[in-house]
């Protein structure tokens, strides 16, 4: 995707971006208000996804060409499903394992957000995307540095901060895109 087409897409979706940004700021504030509950919700969601993946793997194992492949697929699917059940049953324990994964997510997201900021650089508000990327890198670094001491509430608090900042960035970009569209005579 080239820079002009990405900028045009942002301009075309400015109002929706602003509304989604407002919703994200509210959700981020709620996550910050109850960081332990947010962390548990993240752990439960991951556990449910792992459980669903295990069930799907079991179902697809019967499509294998040989008995050995069917058995192997079924055993791996059962193991995955059992891990999902354990994760759903013990979400607070899962948070200690999710902490390094979340640190990795923030580090990778920060890199991609910084790249995206540089790609839309002529568009007003690109600096907020860059700051969001740098914030992601900072959060990933903080989580990594504090692990394993970072507690269950750390995931919820950091997710809340990230969601709020992403929402604020979307509001800023949506407003800037509406203003730019009004200047160029193309309503957003």
Image (cartoon, grey):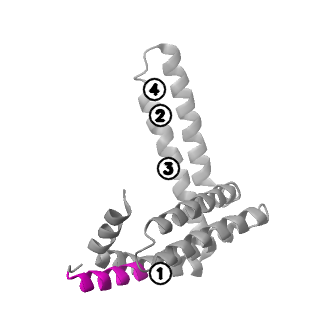
Say whether disc 3 or disc 1 marks the residue closer to the N-terminus.
3
Of circles 3 and 1, the one toward us is 1
Say whether disc 2 or disc 3 marks the residue closer to the N-terminus.
3
Q: CA distance from mark 2 to mark 4?
A: 6 Å
Q: Label 2 neighbourhood size at 10 Å, few (<14), some (14-19), many (20+)?
A: many
Residue 151 visible? The answer is no
Residue drawn at point x = 49 percent, y = 69 percent = 117
Q: Is residue 39 above or below residue 69?
A: below
Secondary element at tag 2 = helix
Say whether disc 4 or disc 3 marks the residue closer to the N-terminus.
3
Main SS category, magenta section: helix
Say whether disc 2 or disc 1 marks the residue closer to the N-terminus.
2
Q: Which residue is mark 3?
A: 49
Q: Is residue 123 above or below residue 91?
A: below
Secondary element at tag 3 = helix
- Is residue 175 inside the magenta stretch? yes
- Is residue 64 inside the magenta stretch? no
Residue drawn at point x = 62 percent, y = 48 percent = 86
Q: Which residue is mark 2?
A: 57
Q: Which range of residues does the magenta coloring cover? A: 171-185
Q: Which residue is mark 1?
A: 168
Q: Which mark is residue 61?
A: 4
Quadrant including the C terminus? bottom left
Residue drawn at point x = 54 percent, y = 54 percent = 46
Q: CA distance from mark 2 to mark 3?
A: 12 Å
Q: Label 1 neighbourhood size at 10 Å, few (<14), some (14-19), many (20+)?
A: many
Q: Label 4 neighbourhood size at 10 Å, few (<14), some (14-19), many (20+)?
A: many
């Amino acid at each position: 995707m080239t820079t002009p087409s990405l900028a045009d897409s942002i301009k075309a979706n400015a109002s929706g971006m602003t509304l989604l940004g407002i919703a994200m700021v509210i959700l981020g504030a709620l996550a910050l208000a109850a960081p332990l509950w947010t962390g548990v919700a993240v752990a439960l969601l991951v556990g449910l996804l792992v459980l669903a993946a295990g069930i799907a793997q079991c179902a697809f194992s019967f499509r294998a060409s040989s008995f050995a492949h069917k058995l192997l697929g079924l055993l791996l699917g059962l193991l995955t499903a059992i891990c999902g059940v354990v994760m759903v049953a013990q979400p607070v324990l899962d948070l200690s394992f999710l902490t390094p994964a979340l640190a990795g997510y923030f580090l990778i997201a920060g890199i991609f957000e910084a790249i995206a900021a540089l790609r839309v650089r002529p568009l007003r508000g690109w600096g907020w995307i860059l700051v969001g990327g740098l914030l992601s890198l900072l959060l990933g670094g903080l989580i990594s540095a504090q692990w394993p001491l970072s507690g269950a509430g750390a995931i919820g608090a950091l997710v809340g901060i990230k969601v709020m900042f992403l929402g604020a960035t979307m509001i800023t970009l949506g407003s800037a895109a509406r203003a730019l569209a009004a200047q160029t005579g193309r309503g957003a």
